Image (cartoon, rainbow, N blue to C red):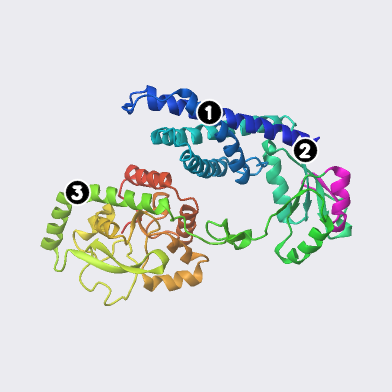
Amino acid sequence: MLKKHSKFFESVLLLADWLALSGAWILSYYLRFYSDIVPAYKGIPPFKIYLMLLLFMIPLWGTVFRIFGLYRPRRVSTRLSEIADIGKASTFATLILIALTFFFRQYEFSRLTFFYFWLINIVFLSLTRILFREFLRFLRRKGYNQRYALVIGTENLAQDLVKILRKHPELGIQISGFLTHDSQSIGNVLQGTKVLGKYSDVRDLVVKLGIDIVFIALPFNAHTQLREVLDCIGDEMVSIMVLPDLFEFISLRGSVSEFEGMPLISLRDTPLYGWNIILKRLLDIVFSTIILIFTSPLIGIISLLIKITSHGPVFFKQERMGMDGKVFNILKFRTMKIDAESATGPVWTKQDDSRRTKIGALLRKTSLDELPQFFNVLRGDMSIVGPRPERPVFINNFRNAIPKYMLRHKMKAGITGWAQVSGWRGNTSVEKRIEYDLYYIENWSLHFDLKIIWLTLWNGFINKHAY
């Protein structure tokens, strides 16, 4: 019965795709030749010629979509991943279609029509899939279109999987039971689900209970038993999904990718890759340029006041550690007397620090001493938003005392950050700062950066912990 249902839903989805494809092609024709977007100087070709091309397009898209796995069940897939696959498959099919039209030498098809169709088709197909998936989720919440699963393992990983699946009834996955290696555990109830038997019972239970999916959620030290479990399942026609117990080792933005057919699990990575790098860099350049232009009179006044009130240079350079552990010279307005650390060595600034100049105390309190760091941003040493950079001389102590401290250097250092707008600035808990810095890196997005910039402006630049 389940296979019949699967075939029925697959047929419905295939028909919906054909309708979306046909609608996109017809709309593209009318946009090209009957709208004023681009005038049709060479005249309007007969509609039936373009309509006939659908006879090739419908089977072509069906074949390509099947190759890209777009008609497989996607219960645990995300909308974004399906839309990305639709974009790839549609692009590939469109290129094949354009190549095929070269054989129709008696007709010249509009390239602009193909361009319109490529865009509109991806949008139509994506909307069709979203509506179809939402309809299936609705049915599954009502108890229809269910799949039944066994979970191999009874430890925390397996129990967490069951808890998560129960939170998502729209997936339509019913857990029939756990399987264990320990005979004494049989009959126990975990997370409201019974332990039905041992690993060796899996094949019999798959047949007896009509199981569709087997989740293998073994602890890390039991992965040697994976071969035993797979041998017990044998050639039963069930889906097998392995949940690797690597969460305890994932420290920053873990992910799964594929290389030459081999799955690669990333335990630690940076969010800055591809378009993310470009977008963040553009934000840095545009924002820094605007700030420096608008504050240039203020920068001139501060420079003059520093020169008048104390002996020494206007600007102060100091080594800081940035992304990937690279050291750079941070630029600030000088707020301390010359050779301020000659007697004390490297130390943090404290409240009512006697080493500050007359104007220095005000500059540090208002954070105006950090204005020159926008030049660091333009140079690429820093970003507007990111973990605040620390001096290398202090980092070795922090690295030994605070777990995961160095992971904050997987993101470019910032003028402001999530820790700072959350109140962990200056002489506050270093541990809490690291916690907030790592949360920022783990959850980075351009929207998050804009939120932090807004909170920095909203909260103001005066801080009780800025000495």
Counting residues from the N terminus, which is met first, the one under dot 1 or under dot 3? 1
Question: Percent x, y for residue 20?
Answer: 55, 29
Q: Quadrant of residue 16?
A: top right
Q: Is residue 371 left or right of residue 187?
A: left
**Residue pictured at 72% horizontal, 29% vertical:** 142
* Residue contact between numbered discs 1 and 2, judged by CB atoms under 8 Å: no
* Residue 21 visible, this orientation: no
Element type at mark 2: helix
Q: Is residue 336 left or right of residue 184?
A: left
Q: Which residues are magenta?
A: 190-210
Across and down, in percent, residue 365 comes to: 28, 54
Q: Is residue 374 placed above or below 313 in the rendered structure?
A: above
Q: Where residue 293 is drawn, which disc sits there?
A: 3
Q: Secondary structure at mark 3?
A: helix
For the point 29% across and 62% down, the residue is: 352
What residue is disc 1 on? 52
Q: Which callout, 1 or 3, points to the residue nearer the camera?
A: 1
Q: Residue at x 42, y 36 (%)?
A: 115
Of pointers 3 and 2, the one earlier in the residue sequence = 2
Q: CA distance from mark 3 to mark 2?
A: 66 Å
Q: Which mark is residue 3?
A: 2
Look at label 2 and name its amino acid. Lys
Question: Is disc 1 surrounded by few (<14), some (14 to 19) or many (20+) residues within 10 Å?
Answer: few
The image quadrant where one finds the N terminus is top right
Q: Is residue 207 magenta?
A: yes
Question: Which tag, 1 or 2, sits closer to the chain's start?
Answer: 2
Q: Position of residue 26 (x, y in %)?
A: 48, 26
Q: Number of marks in the image?
A: 3
